[in-house]
Amino acid sequence: MTRWLAMGLVVAGLAMPAAARAQDSGIGFFPLLHYGITGGGMFPAGPQGDELHRGTHIGGEIYGESGLGVQLGVESSFTASPDPRETRITHVGVLSRLSPSPEDYRLYVQLGLGGYSVSYSAGTPRLASVFRPGGSFAIGAEVIQFGSFSLGGSGAYHGIILQSHKAIAYAAVRLHLTYQRSGL
């Protein structure tokens, strides 16, 4: 229960507009910031996901439109698998979004790198928690725009390197709710 509360606070902190930290025009390099929350399902992917079962995936992200023709930002997520070991994966990383049209990011490809904490709540013997590097690849779209908010979805693939010949892989299908700060 404590992990769910901690992860909820992390996601809420990422998703809340940081009015005290940012002017309406954004922070330096990023003239326009976006704050998003995501939620959906997790599915084992490939032979590296054999140990996992279908589960839940929640997250948050903050990203900005850079002058480089890409969106750059940070993301965090929590994934829970109801497998016999009750695998829990917490992720914090950086992201880069590319779009077919540099001025319109409604359709995008997202690449991410980060650290993944993999822990187990059950099983005998109980495996030790580990923190390992990993990456993600996603394809998404923002479908509906209403005021400063947009609603969309994405499909993502996450791969985590556990050892030289062992990895965990899963896919996440997510809905997104994004708040975009507008300049005055």
Image (cartoon, rainbow, N blue to C red):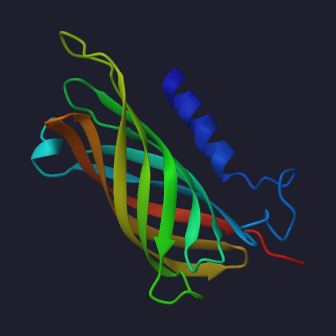
The answer to whether 159 appears left or right of 58 in the picture is left
Locate residue 127, reporting x and y percent.
25, 16
Locate residue 108, reporting x and y percent.
45, 77
Locate residue 125, reporting x and y percent.
19, 9
Q: Quadrant of residue 23?
A: bottom right
Locate residue 4, reporting x and y percent.
51, 30
Q: Nearer the viewer, residue 4 or 165?
A: 165
Q: Nearer the viewer, residue 22 or 182?
A: 22
Q: Is residue 134 above or below residue 82?
A: below
Q: Residue furthest left?
A: 47
Q: Quadrant of residue 88?
A: top left
Q: Nearer the viewer, residue 54 or 160?
A: 160
Q: Quadrant of the C terminus?
A: bottom right
Q: Is residue 80 above or below residue 112?
A: above
Asked if residue 53 shows in the view, the reply is no
Residue ID at (73%, 72%)? 32
Residue ID at (50%, 90%)? 101
Residue ID at (50%, 59%)? 95
Q: Quadrant of residue 180?
A: bottom right
Q: Is residue 27 above or below residue 69?
A: above
Number of marks in the rendered image: 0
Q: Residue furthest top?
A: 125
Asked if residue 101 shows in the view, the reply is yes
Residue ID at (53%, 21%)? 2
The answer to whether 57 appears left or right of 71 in the picture is left
